[in-house]
Image (cartoon, rainbow, N blue to C red):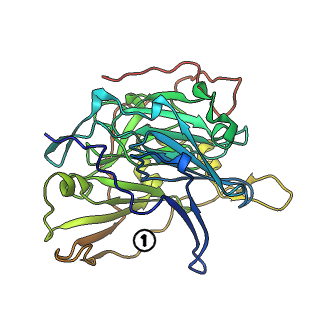
Amino acid sequence: MHFRKLDNVTNVCPYTLNVYDLNTDQRIRKYVFRPEDIVSTTFIANIALDEGPTCEDTFAYFPDELGYGLISYSWKQNKSWRFSHSYFFPDPLVGDFNIAGLNFQWGAEGIFGISASSIGPDGFRTLYFSPLSSHTEFAVSTRILRDESKVSGSYRDFKVVGVRGQDSHTTSKVVDESGVQLFNLIDQNAIGCWNTELPLKPQNVAIADKDDVGLVFPSDVKIDDQRRVWVMSDRMPVFLEAELDYSDINFRIFTAPLDMLLQGTVCQPSPAQKYKSAKVLQSPGLSAYYEPVKNLQPQPVPFMYNAPAPMLSQGNPSFNMQIVPNFVPKVTSYINFPKQPTVQFNTRQPNKWWRKNYDVYENA
């Protein structure tokens, strides 16, 4: 039995945001978070970007996993501020983990996985988030997070979205422009999916891919502008709770077209949703509009790589890394609805803010 402790966080350097221009490899901004934004146990492991119509209108959001906070940063103001909320805390009922044959307890893990939706009708995004030690998904409009004055008095602006179901701890998630969310399911060695147009409950969650060898702790999930999914796995719990076999492949990068992974699942977007996921064009003085894309199926990645990676620390053998293109999904959909159920929306706030009624099936 093992419990992660809160007193083992040591920050050698102050938490700092560094922004680079990838065209020139030059750092264009360095921002050190204010002392008011950080607590003694702060641990930041994720970031979500909220881009507006211009570069100046860009925000970034940082979950503080062990300090139980959410930090907003404004590019234009070059300033950050911190939100606190009880939804950032872990659920004490689901702190037990079983991964790769190891049983351990990470009961102190708070807000971790976050992802921003596309821009809604009200001009703002939805930020989805969940604590690592939790099966519940929460959300808040970026209208709140962009406003420093909302740090106080915004408790009711944070909403419960629903519950993914049992064995659904997650550390990473991403929302496609079509409105489909992908997330890692670290207990199941899998990638899960949910169509945000449906209520979040176990019946509307599916497995997009599962691999009990290659996807042991799929630590990160991303979708590129060609709607291709990228997943990295690293067997981190084995490293933390036991010992890695350094002669084995411990680090893998998987990639596959999003549509292929969603095919046949309850997460599959409707034609209208696919249209929304087309490229967004912006012109000076004009509002963004959608351009239909004829071919939404990206071309396969034309390589496969399997070779030793550089040593991560002196004295250890080389880690092996494998990059696997077009991994074949093993689709498991809990329920495929013949048609989408009718959903009630909160008409007072656009962009689903937030459904008047939601069902919670913690043990379903």
Residue 182, percent from left and from top: 44, 47
Answer yes or no: is residue 175 visible: no
Crowd rating for badge 1 (residues with CA inside 10 Å; few <14, some 14–19, many 20+):
few
242 or 73, which lies in front? 73
Q: Residue at x 15, y 68 (%)?
A: 248
User: Which quarter of the figure has residue 203?
Assistant: top left
Of the 4 image quadrants, the one containing the N terminus is top left
Q: Is residue 314 left or right of residue 362?
A: left
Instruction: Please count the marks in the image.
Output: 1
Residue 23, percent from left and from top: 60, 78
Answer yes or no: is residue 165 visible: yes
Of the 4 image quadrants, the one containing the C terminus is top left
Q: Is residue 335 left or right of residue 153?
A: left
Label 1 sits on what residue type?
Answer: Val
User: Which quarter of the figure has residue 215?
Assistant: bottom left
Q: Residue at x 49, y 40 (%)?
A: 69
Q: Is residue 360 left or right of residue 23?
A: left
Element at badge 1? loop
Residue 319, percent from left and from top: 22, 72
| Rendered view: 143 above or below 49 | above
311 or 363, which lies in front? 311
351 or 61, which lies in front? 61
Q: Is residue 327 left or right of residue 137?
A: left
Q: Residue pushed farthest bottom?
A: 24
Mark 1 lies on residue: 301
